[in-house]
Image (spheres, rainbow, N blue to C red):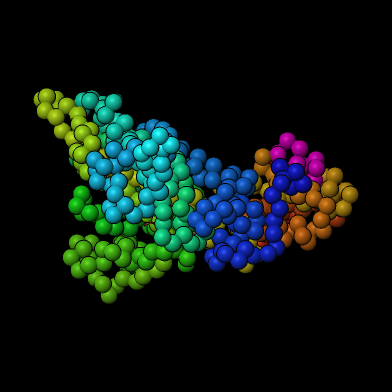
Amino acid sequence: MKFSELFVKTSREAPKSETARGARFLVQAGFVHKELAGVYDYLPFGLSVLEKIKNIIREELDKIGCQEVLLSTLQNPELWQKTDRWDIEKMDIWFKTELSSGGELGLAPTHEEPLTELMKSYIKSYKDLPVAAYQIQTKFRNELRAKSGIMRGREFIMKDLYSFSSTETEHEEFYHKTEQAYAKIYERLGIGDCTYQTFASGGVFAKYSHEFQTVVEVGEDTIWHNADWSVVLNEEVLQDEILENLGVKREELESTKAAEVGNIFTLKDKYSAPLGLEFTERDGTKHPVLMGCYGIGVSRLMGVIAEKFADTKGLIWPEAIAPFRYYLVGIGTEGVQKAAELYRGNENEILFDDRDLRPGEKFADAELIGIPYRIVVSGKTLENNEAEVTERKTGETKMVKLSDLTF
Ligand code: ATP
Ligand code: MG
């Protein structure tokens, strides 16, 4: 893409309302636009990052046999009444709206109810199980506090996966596959070494649920870990009995701030029983389908990654999700001409800063936007048929022969 053609402009001024560094840079670098507290628009760079995150999630979930769907946002109250989750007293984050013909609808905060109901049309027998369906969809939650930019939104993008099994063993097998797929996803997103699977409270359905927590200063959660991080748990399960279960002592644990980027839950028949999602066993008996649910905060992940890797100058995107791989600057007539040549045919990989600005301003934007590599060509570098390539993450610069530049 040519920078001159982009309608988005970067800004030197920090937005007043964003306190966290990553959140501030996302606005300044033109990745997102704030509509309201907790409500954001995604601009071309931001959308590109978001789509790359989604595709990594898709690839890993498809590998374990999950099938993608897209359910409606508008929700039928009747379903949520059956599971006792329609009442605002029971679920305080509902956004509700009205039909012009009378009656209420909800804006989906999650999708257990509609997907369980939908599956009644397709799951009849043990032969139809196991199955798993996921979607990447906008959720609405009337969160009391919406801070840290896109890390906690009132409208945000979630990947939600639901599994349907006939036996506990079948469920556990799938649960385990998801754990592994999640680890792979976070690794590919560049946060594998700072994202931990933690023990969280599991309610009445399992001993624990699990969360995936990324260590980051602005995280809202506190996690506790032992010296080698082999046991990591959420604060809410920091109880003697659980510690004993996990074989760790309170004294050996340390705490740190983290952001929940995903979670996995065993639901058993919590939703299938009240909604009547049953299957027929080999012997003709009927049983509620056993369910699991597995979330990933897609837009939160973008916020966490922005936050985690930002330095004082701007964002630093991991290569796998950067909107472009290269930021190209030509200096002087000769440099600009050569840059235009390099750009041709590599429009998706290169953000070509062809704006009529001083090199210093372009370099500052390159740092703010956080593209992994900056390539500079000038009369001077061309004397040796070279380009200067600088890695955003390390700041390391090296001279590369033009013939060795591969895009
Ligand atoms: P939290 O404790 O952060 O409120 P949650 O327990 O409500 O999260 P789920 O309802 O299970 O989370 O949602 C699945 C995932 O969606 C979470 O792990 C998180 O990454 C993300 N998520 C939840 N709420 C928000 C939000 N308000 N804004 C952005 N992402 C969110
Ligand atoms: Mg929540």
User: In the figure, residue 360 lies in which quadrant?
Assistant: bottom right
Q: Residue at x 49, y 42 (%)?
A: 54
User: Left or right of 245: which side holds 407?
Assistant: right
Relative depth, front residue between 76 and 189: 76
Quarter of the picture containing the N terminus is: top right
Is 341 colored magenta in this rendering? Answer: yes
Quarter of the picture containing the C terminus is: top right
Residue found at the far right of this picture: 333
User: In the figure, residue 142 lies in which quadrant?
Assistant: bottom left
Q: Residue at x 60, y 56 (%)?
A: 26
User: Left or right of 122: which side holds 71?
Assistant: right
Whole-percent x, y for residue 170 in the image: 23, 37
Whole-percent x, y for residue 382 in the image: 84, 50
Residue 274 visible somewhere in the drawing = yes
Q: In the picture shown, does residue 4 fall above or below 144?
A: above
Q: Which residues are magenta?
A: 339-347
User: In the figure, residue 132 lies in which quadrant?
Assistant: top left
Relative depth, front residue between 334 and 280: 280
Q: In the picture shown, does residue 195 fall above or below 168?
A: below
Whole-percent x, y for residue 241 in the image: 18, 65
Quadrant hosting ligand 2: bottom left
Residue 391 visible somewhere in the drawing = no
Q: Residue at x 54, y 42 (%)?
A: 51
Count of residue discs: 0
Residue found at the far front of this picture: 101
Relative depth, front residue between 382 and 369: 369
Q: Residue at x 66, y 42 (%)?
A: 349
Is 173 colored magenta in this rendering? Answer: no
